[in-house]
């Protein structure tokens, strides 16, 4: 297998200060969003290097972004202790969801179903669930099993998966009121992804490791090392039809590993040698594009 997406196509500029999060629009991934320490959110067409819209409303840095399945809405979160729900077309804030008492590290729409379920994870060690179809600004449920800050969340149907600084990943079945806990690392877990078939977890931790975990028995399938990740949150992701694993690094590189063999395939220099904080692979079958965000304030588009 050859990792084909290893060249920088373009660099998107517009943020002042570090870019903390990037995400693609759902399904086709035609557009992407970026948020940063300048409290701004930008909507881009990564294939044409065009900035389409800027969303302003946050009073603190933006730490996480997620798009609804129909791409009509997106949610953002950060240091405000709030979750902002936006209308993409009009660039207006529809609601500000209240419930957390500390910064919100992660927010995620359900990838399946009608997209009405939204989850947020916070420094206050809770995961809040919201019904975006309701006009109520309060959460419909609060999950408080974590012993430390919640760092990332993934939602699929009635399942919510959350990572925490306590080194654990918790999978909740919100219909059955059941929680399965996997002990991942003695170090804080900072980034989380679920494979397309739902059978594996990809988690990054502050011990300089990315782990591929078997969800059926909690066993370690593969461990990916070499990058620097000791103090800051850097994101990991599956890449190229889940043949590879990619992760940012505090050393200013994007690392690429073979998923099955665990060997290093590429070390891509980017973002002026500054921290590569986030990475996202374009959705859609056969896509060969990804985006990264970094502490240099840019978004780099890779591949086609």
Image: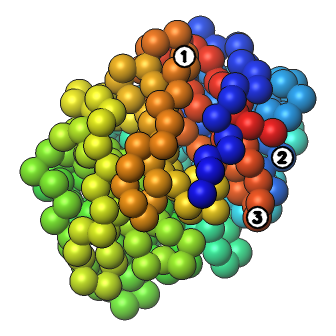
> For the residue labelled by badge 2, is the local secondary structure a helix, a strand or a loop?
loop
Give the Cα distance between marks 3 and 2.
Answer: 13 Å
In the image, what residue occupies the spot 46% across and 54% down? 258
> For the residue labelled by badge 3, is the local secondary structure a helix, a strand or a loop?
loop
Query: Badge 3: few (under 14), some or many (20 or more) residues near its Cα, within 10 Å?
Result: few
CB atoms at circles 1 and 3 under 8 Å apart?
A: no
Residue 241 coordinates in the image, percent (x, y): 64, 62
State the image quarter where residue 284 is shown. Answer: bottom right
Residue 126 coordinates in the image, percent (x, y): 29, 56
Which mark sits nearer the N-terminus, 3 or 2? 2
Which mark sits nearer the N-terminus, 1 or 3? 1
In the image, what residue occupies the spot 32% across and 49% down? 224
Question: Label 1 belongs to which residue?
Answer: 271
Q: Nearer the viewer, mark 2 or mark 1?
A: 1
Question: Label 2 belongs to which residue?
Answer: 30
Which mark sits nearer the N-terminus, 2 or 1? 2
CB atoms at circles 3 and 2 under 8 Å apart?
A: no
Color scheme of the displayed model: rainbow
């Amino acid at each position: 297998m050859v990792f084909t997406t290893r060249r920088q196509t373009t660099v998107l500029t517009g943020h002042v200060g570090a870019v903390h999060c990037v995400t693609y629009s759902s399904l086709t991934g035609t557009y992407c969003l970026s948020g940063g320490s300048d409290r701004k959110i930008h909507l881009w067409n990564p294939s044409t290097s065009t900035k389409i819209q800027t969303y302003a409303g946050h009073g603190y840095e933006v730490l996480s972004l997620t798009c609804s399945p129909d791409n009509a809405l997106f949610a953002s979160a950060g240091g405000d202790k709030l979750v902002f729900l936006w209308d993409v077309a009009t660039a207006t804030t529809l609601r500000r969801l209240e419930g957390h008492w500390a910064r919100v590290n992660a927010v995620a729409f359900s990838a399946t179903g009608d997209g009405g379920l939204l989850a947020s994870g916070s420094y206050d060690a809770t995961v809040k669930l919201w019904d975006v179809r309701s006009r109520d600004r309060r959460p419909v449920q609060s999950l408080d099993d974590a012993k430390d800050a919640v760092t990332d969340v993934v939602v699929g149907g009635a399942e919510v998966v959350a990572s925490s600084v306590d080194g654990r990943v918790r999978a909740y079945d919100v219909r059955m009121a059941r929680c399965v806990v996997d002990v991942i690392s003695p170090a804080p877990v900072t980034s989380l992804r679920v494979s397309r078939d739902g059978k594996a977890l990809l988690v990054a931790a502050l011990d300089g490791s990315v782990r591929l975990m078997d969800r059926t028995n909690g066993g370690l399938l593969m461990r990916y090392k070499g990058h620097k990740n000791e103090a800051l949150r850097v994101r990991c992701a599956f890449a190229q039809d889940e043949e590879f694993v990619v992760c940012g690094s505090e050393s200013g590189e994007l690392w690429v590993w073979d998923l099955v063999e665990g060997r290093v395939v590429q070390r891509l220099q980017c973002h002026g040698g500054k921290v590569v904080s986030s990475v996202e692979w374009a959705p859609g079958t056969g896509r060969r594009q990804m985006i990264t965000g970094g502490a240099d304030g840019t978004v780099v588009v890779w591949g086609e």
